Each structure stands twice: as structure tokens, then as C-alpha cells.
Image (cartoon, rainbow, N blue to C red):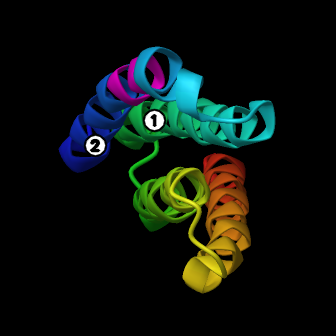
């Protein structure tokens, strides 16, 4: 078991429920459909990768290699960068902020982190005899 991956995944999954409910009940009246879709995409990917973190934590018990731990790190970074930037973009757009301060460029970096995490997990499984 890799406890940091498990606890991070569980916390992020629970937080995704809270953030999703906040978006659906508190933000929805203030957002355009496009902004709501952006916010929901952040919640969706947060959920997917919270479960990926939990899976990584469990998988480490059976395949205790560095790539599994690294995959968890990249999943966590991906959630922070990808989902976090989508939440920030939504809030900035809702407030009418112009320019958005380059926040949008962070989203693809988070997406790359997700891809790297999945590739590392694949390498770990392929490494197992």
C-alpha cells in the first residue's frame, strides 16, 4: 500500500463531490453554459484521477516499483494543474476578468501530467514478471 496516494485520492474524490455540488447549486445561476461545461470538465477529470491515485496506491502493494509512486505524483500534479486551472478560469470569467493572466496555458500542462502518469503506470505493469 502506498498511503500518500490512497489518502490523496480519497481526499480529492471527496473534494470533487463538494466542488461539483458547489458548481451545480451555487455557481450554475451565474455561469454561461460554456463556463459551466468548463467547470464540470475540471470536476470530471478530478474524479477520474482521484480514482487513478487510489488505484496506484493499491497497485503499489503488488508492484512496488518507483514508476507506480511516480504515476501517483503525476496524477496529483495533473489534478492540481488541469482541474485547478479550469476552476480558476471559470471563476475569472465569471468575475469578468480580462486577459486571465495566462491561467489557460496551465491546463495542457496538467493534461500532460495525466498522460505521463498513465504511461508510468503502464511501464510499471509491463515491468512486472
Magenta residues span 18-22
Q: CA distance from mark 2 to mark 1?
A: 7 Å
In this view, 100 is above or below 86 = below
Give how far across and how far down residue 88 sits, in percent: 50, 59
Give how far across and how far down residue 40 sits, in percent: 64, 31
Asked if residue 84 is among those painted magenta in the image, a careful observer would answer no
Location of residue 65 by image quarter = bottom left
Q: Which residue is mark 2?
A: 8
In this view, 77 is above or below 44 = below
Q: Which quadrant of the rendered structure holds the N terminus? A: top left
**Mark 2–mark 1 CB contact (< 8 Å):** yes
- 48 relative to 32 in the view: left or right: left
Q: Nearer the viewer, residue 87 or 3?
A: 87
Q: Residues within 10 Å of mark 1 (few under 14, many from 20)?
A: many
Give how far across and how far down residue 87 sits, in percent: 51, 50
Q: Please tell me the numbered disc located at residue 50.
A: 1
Residue lying at 48% horizontally and 57% vertically, measured from the top left: 84
Classify mark 2: helix, strand or loop: helix
Amino acid at each position: 500500500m502506498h498511503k500518500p496516494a490512497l489518502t490523496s485520492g480519497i481526499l480529492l474524490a471527496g473534494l470533487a463531490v463538494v466542488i461539483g455540488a458547489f458548481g451545480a447549486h451555487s455557481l450554475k445561476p451565474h455561469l454561461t453554459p460554456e463556463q459551466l461545461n468548463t467547470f464540470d470538465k475540471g470536476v470530471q477529470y478530478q474524479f477520474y484521477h482521484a480514482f487513478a491515485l487510489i488505484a496506484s496506491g493499491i497497485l503499489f502493494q503488488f508492484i512496488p516499483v518507483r514508476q507506480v509512486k511516480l504515476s501517483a505524483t503525476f496524477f496529483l500534479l495533473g489534478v492540481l494543474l488541469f482541474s485547478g486551472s479550469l476552476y480558476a478560469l471559470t471563476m475569472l470569467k465569471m468575475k469578468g476578468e480580462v486577459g486571465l493572466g495566462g491561467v489557460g496555458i496551465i491546463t495542457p500542462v496538467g493534461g500532460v501530467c495525466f498522460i505521463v502518469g498513465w504511461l508510468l503506470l503502464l511501464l510499471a505493469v509491463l515491468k512486472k514478471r
